[in-house]
């Protein structure tokens, strides 16, 4: 078992690659909690691929990754593994993102009993015409729910304004039209192609003895090593954005706004750039910033805007998000102070304070088992190793952050998505 240690934060990760190719990572913690997540590197953007041995391309309906997530709990005896796990007193769930799907549970007791059920359902899919059809209405309702969720509409509208061809435009749940095309044969095709050990990772964080826990996992692994992985096909994305501004009316009381900046440089070190964006966001938009102070005192915003650098192997962008009744004034003030930073540079004391604050928040995030495990999975599928964010902090200086500021926050790559309250017209 390989041990990866970061002495600066006193954390260890025990890593083992099983004979079948499955990677297991165990992070012991001084807590009563136990958290496990088993994830496949398959998400909403993976809709075109060549399966191993196939000479023709497979194209699957949008939303199938999420549909498979729902159906994997179904068992041959008519039970649902989610119900079985919950009956053991564990908090079980699953989620689908643009590039991976994860199955998980968290508990303080009955971990080993739950592990048997957990590993059984992930490794033994059971799809029939009847149970696939039964799920269609449930997921259709979920799609309608997301359609009514302002923050999701805000995000998807921003992605469609930013990207013309990139698969990030695909709604994770699909549409009612696309899920109508999903059947058991397509689900088995996806499972047999992507839910193979070499394309999966299992991460555990919490009250574990790594060697003992690893043996329990090995006892329950039945997946065999497969010959080769699928070749994924992604669309070519032009550098230009699609449109500068997109607006939608929904049943909300206060407008929601997302300012996005498309990043066309996918070759840069994205970890360093992510840290730089967080530092810029803290200096520009945190509660101690000049921007927030001016907007708050004038009654134009009441909560701190958020900033995030979202990226994968095929896309990257910055998102600044806030709520306000004075949309144009807030956008103008953010842009004014952003340009001031670009033109005059970052003050040394502002940089030092933001970097120290963010480093502290990152170290603190290692104390929450669910956060550190889910982040480890997301990073792994992006090609990022454990502790890379911690290690990169020492390589971030003010000059680098100012370069990111100049290269990333440019007008020609900016989009604005707004959700406004319904009018009485």
Image (cartoon, helix red, strand yellow):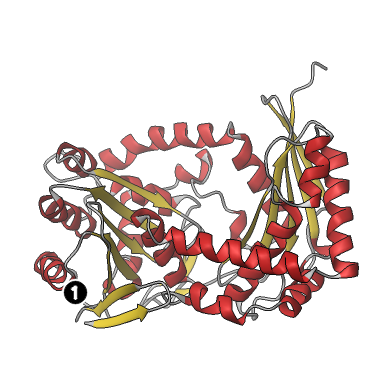
Q: Position of residue 68 (x, y in %)?
A: 35, 51
Q: Residue shown at 89%/54% (left/top)?
A: 336
Q: Residue shown at 84%/70% (left/top)?
A: 345
Q: Residues within 10 Å of mark 1 (few under 14, many from 20)?
A: few
Quarter of the image with the N terminus is bottom left
Q: Who is closer to the viewer here, 9 or 339? A: 9
**Vertical arrangement, residue 196 with respect to residue 241, above or below:** below
Q: Residue shown at 26%/74% (left/top)?
A: 22
**Vertical arrangement, residue 202 with respect to residue 259, above or below:** below
Q: Quadrant of residue 374?
A: bottom left
Q: Residue shown at 31%/74% (left/top)?
A: 13
Residue 346 lies left or right of residue 109; in this view the side is right
Residue 380 lies left or right of residue 421; in this view the side is left
Q: Who is closer to the viewer here, 326 or 295? A: 295
Quarter of the image with the C terminus is top right
Residue for badge 1: 224
Q: Position of residue 56 (x, y in %)?
A: 45, 73
**Total count of labels:** 1
């Amino acid at each position: 078992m390989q041990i990866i240690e970061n002495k600066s934060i006193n954390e260890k990760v025990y890593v083992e690659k099983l004979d079948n190719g499955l990677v297991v990572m165990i992070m012991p913690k001084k807590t009563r909690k136990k958290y496990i997540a088993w994830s496949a590197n398959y998400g909403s953007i993976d809709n075109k691929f060549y399966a191993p041995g196939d000479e023709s391309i497979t194209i699957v309906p949008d939303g199938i990754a999420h549909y498979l997530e729902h159906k994997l709990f179904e068992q041959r005896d008519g039970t649902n593994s989610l119900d079985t796990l919950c009956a053991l007193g564990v908090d079980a769930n699953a989620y689908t993102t643009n590039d991976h799907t994860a199955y998980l549970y968290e508990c303080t007791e009955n971990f080993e009993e739950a592990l048997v059920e957990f590993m059984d359902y992930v490794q033994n899919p059971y799809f029939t015409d009847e149970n696939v059809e039964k799920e269609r209405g449930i997921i259709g309702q979920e799609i309608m729910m997301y359609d009514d969720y302002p923050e999701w509409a805000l995000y998807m509208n921003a992605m469609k304004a930013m990207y013309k061809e990139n698969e990030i435009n695909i709604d994770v749940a699909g549409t009612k039209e696309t899920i109508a095309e999903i059947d058991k044969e397509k689900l088995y095709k996806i499972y047999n192609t992507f839910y193979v050990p070499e394309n999966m990772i299992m991460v555990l964080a919490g009250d574990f003895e790594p060697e003992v826990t690893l043996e329990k996992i090995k006892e329950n692994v039945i997946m065999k090593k497969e010959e080769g992985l699928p070749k994924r096909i992604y669309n070519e994305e032009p550098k230009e954005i699609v449109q500068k501004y997109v607006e939608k009316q929904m049943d909300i009381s206060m407008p929601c706004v997302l300012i996005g900046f498309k990043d066309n440089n996918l070759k840069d070190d994205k970890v360093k750039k992510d840290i730089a964006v967080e530092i810029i966001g803290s200096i520009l938009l945190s509660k101690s910033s000049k921007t927030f102070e001016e907007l708050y005192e004038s009654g134009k915003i009441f909560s701190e805007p958020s900033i995030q650098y979202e990226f994968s192997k095929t896309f990257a962008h910055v998102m600044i998000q806030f709520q306000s009744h004075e949309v144009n004034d807030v956008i103008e003030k953010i842009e004014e102070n952003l340009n001031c930073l670009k033109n005059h540079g970052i003050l040394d004391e502002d940089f030092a304070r933001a970097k120290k604050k963010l480093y502290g928040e990152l170290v603190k995030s290692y104390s929450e088992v669910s956060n550190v495990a889910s982040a480890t999975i997301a990073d792994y599928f992006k090609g990022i190793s454990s502790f890379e964010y911690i290690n990169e902090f020492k390589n971030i200086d003010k000059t680098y952050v100012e370069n990111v500021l100049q290269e990333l926050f440019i007008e020609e790559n900016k989009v604005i998505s707004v959700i406004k309250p319904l009018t009485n017209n």
